[in-house]
């Protein structure tokens, strides 16, 4: 163990049969009203990271919905379902498993603190109680790309500003300890003002214990609610990326993070109830706003990072996972062909069977 500033580096399944079997365009409550900015929406003619059709308010055709099996003790809240595209309707990738009323967070994308507020406001008091600021303790990072980690400062420091005395326990790929140490160093002025100013705050709640991970298939955490194991995956040139398998009292839940097919992901998802995973269109890859100038360049570049539908078919068939919930969708159809469920339908055309859901922020599974 070694100290880095305020950081210490430490080292019966049930099916989803009660969850609706897949999703159709009309499933779920209709949106009662469009976002505030919808009345001022000017349809873009220049398409890019700020204006891709996936960001257009008219394509969000339902409200968040609780799709968790009736009576489960381990619902999963979708806090952020987005990707690096600047989507006002989707926060950055972040989820929370709530087991017996206690939360375990997976990834900390852009806006996680506000995403928690959104989740509580659409789901009610049970989630508000789970997200009590002193319950915000455990965070599991799938990889260290900016879009999955930029919310870490607010996840640590905002609860502290409101009086939390719970120090954080963070697990992630090798490099996580250095990242969190740099974050706390970067906000040193903020922290010292809390300690030395009129609040005279205790340092309890402002520190983080971090466990860097490198091994495949190891159990990394266990308490009375969950057993968590980490499996190495493949995502671009990153040396260490992980999927997490959560075994709860009534379900097995797997969080794949980003990446294409990998044996580690299949192993993590073996026989699980739900795999929460990203995917990227192949049929409409020519419309991607990054990755190169030609279709072949985009297939090669994006395919090194993300899950095309044929890859997802392999994962589903080899793992036997019962259901798939999509997050971080990269649905690059042009405006005249775009639908919110377009990527899900493409995945089904690729031969992926079983319940598949296209998630929205605020959904519960």
Image (cartoon, helix red, strand yellow):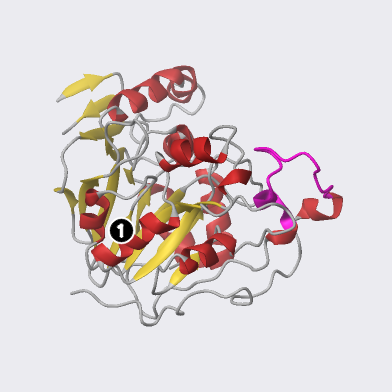
Name the residue located 32 percent from the left edge and 50 percent from the top edge.
Answer: 261
- Position of 343 with respect to 160 (left or right) is right
Name the residue located 15 percent from the left edge and 48 percent from the top edge.
Answer: 217
- Position of 170 with respect to 305 (left or right) is left
Q: Quadrant of residue 338?
A: bottom right
- Position of 159 with respect to 44 (left or right) is left
Instruction: State the image coordinates of residue 109 (x, y, percent, origin top left).
Output: 48, 42
How many numbered marks are there?
1
Residue 351 against residue 53 in the figure, above or below: below
Q: Main secondary structure of the magenta part?
A: loop
The range drawn in magenta is: 41-57
Name the residue located 61 percent from the left edge and 38 percent from the top edge.
Answer: 289
Q: Nearer the viewer, residue 329 or 149?
A: 329
Q: Residues within 10 Å of mark 1 (few under 14, many from 20)?
A: many
Q: Quadrant of residue 294?
A: top right
Q: Is residue 51 magenta?
A: yes
Residue position for label 1? 254
Instruction: State the image coordinates of residue 110 (x, y, percent, origin top left).
Output: 53, 40
Q: Is residue 59 visible?
A: yes
Residue 334 against residue 127 in the figure, above or below: above
Q: Which quadrant of the rendered structure holds the C terminus?
A: bottom left
Name the residue located 37 percent from the left edge and 35 percent from the top edge.
Answer: 236
Residue 32 against residue 42 in the figure, above or below: below
């Amino acid at each position: 163990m070694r100290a880095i500033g305020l950081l210490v580096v430490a080292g019966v399944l049930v099916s989803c049969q009660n969850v609706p079997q897949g999703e159709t365009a009309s499933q779920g409550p209709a949106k009662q009203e469009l976002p505030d900015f919808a009345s001022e929406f000017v349809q873009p003619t220049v398409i890019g990271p700020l204006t891709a059709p996936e960001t257009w308010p008219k394509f969000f055709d339902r409200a968040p919905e609780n799709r968790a099996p009736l009576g489960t003790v381990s619902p999963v809240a979708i806090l952020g379902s987005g990707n690096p595209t600047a989507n006002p309707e989707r926060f950055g990738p972040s989820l929370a498993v709530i087991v017996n009323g206690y939360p375990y967070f997976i990834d900390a994308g852009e806006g996680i603190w506000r995403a928690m507020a959104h989740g509580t406001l659409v789901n009610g008091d049970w989630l508000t109680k789970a997200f009590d600021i002193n319950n915000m303790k455990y965070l599991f990072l799938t990889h260290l790309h900016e879009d999955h980690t930029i919310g870490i400062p607010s996840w640590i420091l905002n609860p502290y500003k409101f009086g939390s005395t719970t120090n954080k326990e963070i697990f992630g790929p090798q490099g996580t300890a250095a990242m969190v140490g740099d974050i706390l160093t970067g906000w040193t002025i903020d922290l010292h003002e809390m300690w030395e100013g009129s609040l005279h705050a205790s340092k309890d709640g402002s520190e983080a214990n971090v466990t860097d991970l490198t091994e495949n298939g190891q159990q990394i955490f266990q308490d009375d609610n969950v057993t968590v194991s980490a499996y190495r995956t493949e995502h671009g040139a990153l040396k260490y990326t992980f999927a997490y398998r959560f075994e709860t009292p009534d379900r097995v839940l797997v969080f794949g993070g980003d990446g294409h097919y990998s044996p580690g992901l299949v192993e993590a998802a073996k026989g699980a109830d739900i795999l929460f995973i990203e995917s990227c269109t192949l049929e409409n890859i020519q419309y991607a706003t990054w990755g190169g100038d030609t279709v072949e360049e985009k297939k090669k570049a994006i395919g090194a990072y993300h899950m095309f539908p044929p890859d997802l078919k392999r994962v589903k068939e080899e793992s036997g996972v019962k259901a798939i919930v999509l997050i971080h969708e990269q649905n690059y159809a042009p405006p005249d062909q775009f639908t919110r469920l377009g990527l899900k339908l493409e995945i089904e055309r690729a031969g992926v069977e079983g319940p598949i859901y296209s998630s929205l922020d605020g959904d519960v599974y």
